[in-house]
Image (tube, rainbow, N blue to C red):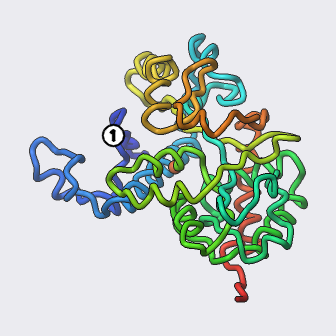
Amino acid sequence: MTWPILPTTVVGSYPQPDWLVDHEMLMSVTPPRVRLSKVWHMRGDELERAQDEATRLAVRDMEEAGLLEPAKSKVLEENIPAQYRHPEGLWYGLTVRGRVIWASGDRVKPGEIASYEDLTDPKWKGRICVRSGKHVYNVFLIASLIAHKGEAAAAEWLKGMKANLARKPQGNDRAQAKAIYSGQCDVALANTYYVGKMATNEKSPEEKKWAAAIRLIFPNQRDRGTHVNVSGAGVAKHARNKANAIRLIEFLSGDFAQKLYAEQNFEYPVKRGAEVNPLVKSWGGFKADAIGLAKVAEHRKAASKLVDQVDFDNPSISN
Ligand SMILES: [Fe+2]
């Protein structure tokens, strides 16, 4: 059987699956503009979330289908610490974000939580909110627990978390801040950059209140460090302009682009010594888990299975 040529998208554009974009409408406008809000099936935050998911699905599909090409580059090796890139150059991390703990500024005292492990303490029963355990951010956190402590310990942690949930896992990361703001829960797991995005959101100013309601906690500073994930890039195997693709990734890992990521999206630059946004700086420095993310990724499937086995997304909530 002959395989169809796999469709690739132009650098800089979003993947545009049918469930996300009205292709007929898109092609009826000349030139086709995805910036037109009417071509998307979703709006606002929901659209942002769907675009994120579509991007992740597209990259994962490519990785699993073996469609990424090992790319070697001295510049990339210099700019990006080894822990944040694939050992053979299948992908390169471009920004780093902590998967941290958000705690209510009023209802959780400083120092009450020091680690991810602390969250399984029964004192947090009915007080924790989190998005679905199946979401890639949580799956990778669980994968890092497997990498450090083994599957049995990771399963115990998941069960302990599940027992402490205030509600069924739902929403995106920002929705957890809203839940803390509105008193539904006191503690959540989420990425760092959303705090910056909420705190400066002029379009939805109510999010500023959500950000103000939470305090960031960088877990596990006394031992392995805070789990981090990355946004990144890789070269597609069938890319027509491989040299340019690598040059683009090099550019994105350089000072200019790293500064933009830090300024615009409140990310930690992956490049050593690149500037951090002052707001991000105000959260304080932290020690990141030094484990290689390619090592963590090896446990992704096992982590995802654990979430199912523990039935994490279906807690029995007793009020
Ligand atoms: Fe995100």
Residue, x 37% and y 47% (percent of image)?
A: 15
The residue positioned 66% from the left and 63% from the top of the image is: 106
Q: Residue at x 36, y 45 (%)?
A: 14
Residue 286 in the image: x percent, y percent? 73, 35
Amino acid found under the numbered disc labelled 1: Ser
- Disc 1 designates what residue? 13
Above or below, comparing residue 220 to residue 189 in the picture: above
- Please name whichever residue, 133 or 198, is drawn nearer the observer in this view of the structure: 198
- Secondary structure at numbered mark 1: loop
Q: Quadrant of residue 164?
A: bottom right
> Which image quarter is the C terminus in?
bottom right
Across and down, in percent, residue 199 comes to 47, 49
- Label 1: how many residues lie within 10 Å, few (<14), some (14-19) or many (20+)? few
Q: Residue at x 73, y 88 (%)?
A: 318
Seen in the image, is 290 located left or right of residue 196? Answer: right
Q: Is residue 242 visible?
A: no
Q: Is residue 126 left or right of residue 37?
A: right
Query: Looking at the picture, how far across and down is residue 249, in whole percent?
Result: 48, 23
Quadrant assignment, res 159:
bottom right
